[in-house]
Structure formats: C-alpha cells, structure tokens
Amino acid sequence: MATTQVSPPTTQRKSRRTWLAPLVLFVCAVAVYALTIVRTHYSADIWTANFASWHLATTGNPWVVGIPFPVFDHNPLRGEWFLQANGHTVIGRAPGVIAVQLPAYLIASPARMSLVPGALTAAVLTA
C-alpha cells in the first residue's frame, strides 16, 4: 500500500490564514456601522466637526468668517462651537477630530456640506 506524503502548509499560506479572519471581521463591522450612519439628524457636536473638515477640504483654510450659522446665532453655547483666533472665527473643535475626516472629504469632495464622508470615517475608525 502506497502512502502519500502531505506537505505541511507553507509559511505564506499560514500567514494568509492568520490575517484573513480579522480582515473579514473588520469588513463586516465596517459594513454594519456604515449601514447605521447618520445622514440628516445630528447634534451640534457632529455637525461642527464635519463642517470644519468639509470647509477645510474644500477651501483650504479653517476660517469661517462671514459664513452664516443661523442655528447657532441665538444659542447660548455658541462660544463653545465657534472661537476667535487671531481675528478670525474658527470651529472650536479639537484638531484631531477635524483632521481624521479630511481624507474622506478630500476624496468625496462634495459641493455641499454632507455628513456622509465624516460618518463613514467614523464607521471605519469604530470598526
């Protein structure tokens, strides 16, 4: 009776197997989070972060001088969202929150402000 030798899996095959399961889990998590993104109903926190990223990506500068924000005009917390820096008005969010969304807004380059690129970035980061 002849026996056949089964060769052990190659190192390349083993390494492919070790990252395949986490990759599939990551892709599934991104898909689930992406299906639940906010498109219209949002908080001032979400909107200001996304607006700052979109504005920076489309104009190249962070200044929001002269842009009307009617929702915030009579808001007692307006000073929390809009700050004065060197004589300019800027969105008062942490730079990392704005910077992490910039690639999505640069790639999507929507003509109008949209929450979708920032929300998809959040889905990927959460996954």
Image: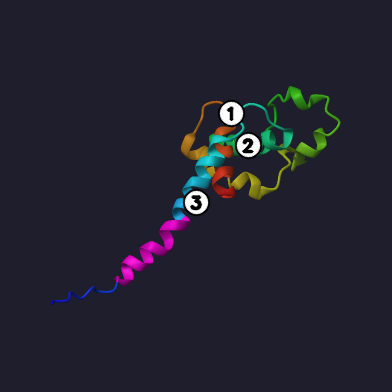
Q: Which residue is mark 1?
A: 113
**Residue with the most extreme front position:** 1
Image height check: is 123 above or below 74?
below
Quadrant in the picture for the N terminus: bottom left
- Quadrant assignment, res 35: top right
| Disc 3 secondary structure class | helix
Q: Mark 2–mark 1 contact, CB under 8 Å? A: yes
**Residue with the most extreme right position:** 76
Q: Residue at x 50, y 41 (%)?
A: 31
Q: Residue at x 71, y 38 (%)?
A: 90
Residue 21, how many percent across, how many down? 44, 57
Distance in Å between CA atoms under marks 3 and 1: 28 Å
- Mark 3: amino acid: Phe
- Mark 2: amino acid: Asn
Q: Which residue is mark 3?
A: 26
Assign the magenta stretch its main secondary structure. Answer: helix
Whether residue 7 sits left or right of residue 56 in the image: it is left
Q: Earlier in the sequence, mark 3 or mark 1?
A: 3
Q: Which residue is mark 2?
A: 50
| Disc 2 secondary structure class | helix
- Mark 1: amino acid: Met
Which stretch did the figure color magenta? 9-22
Image height check: is 103 above or below 42?
below
Q: Nearer the viewer, mark 3 or mark 2?
A: 3
Asked whether residue 97 is in view, the answer is: yes
Residue 23, how many percent across, how many down? 45, 54
Distance in Å between CA atoms under marks 3 and 2: 24 Å
Whether residue 2 sits left or right of residue 36 in the image: it is left
Crowd tier of the residue under label 2, counting other residues whose Cα lies within 10 Å: few below 14, some 14–19, many 20 or above? many
